[in-house]
Amino acid sequence: MGEAARIRIGQDDIEGALDRAILEAGGDLRGALRAMALRQIDLEHRLATTVSAGYVRRGPAVG
């Protein structure tokens, strides 16, 4: 992925996401980490099933 296509996430965004996860887990850090890890796995699965098999095999169409 090219540098221009990357999403820029600021430190405040990360801190806010962590604070929300900990709050939603009732202050349980392990629970917050588990929830965030499960969400990441879910997002990766959705992305993998969204990209067509043809695109994965041949790459993007040129022309």
Image (cartoon, rainbow, N blue to C red):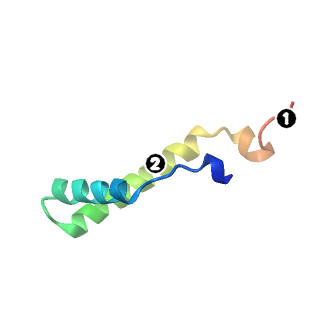
Kindly indicate the quadrant of the structure image that contains residue 36. Answer: bottom left
Q: Residue furthest top?
A: 63
Q: Position of residue 45 (x, y in %)?
A: 50, 49
Mark 2 or 1, closer to the camera: 1
Q: Position of residue 54 (x, y in %)?
A: 74, 39
* 5 up-or-down from 11: above or below: above
Q: Amino acid at mark 1?
A: Val
* Circle 1 Cα neighbour tier, 10 Å, few/some/many (<14 / 14–19 / ≥20): few
Residue 43: numbered disc: 2
Residue at 14% from the left image edge and 63% from the top image edge: 27
* 29 up-or-down from 3: above or below: below
Kindly indicate the quadrant of the structure image that contains residue 16. Answer: bottom left
- Of 13 and 54, nearer the camera is 13
Q: Closer to the N terminus: mark 2 or mark 1? A: 2
Residue 62: numbered disc: 1
Q: Is residue 22 left or right of residue 46?
A: left
Of helix, strand and loop, which one carries label 1?
loop
Residue 20: numbered disc: none
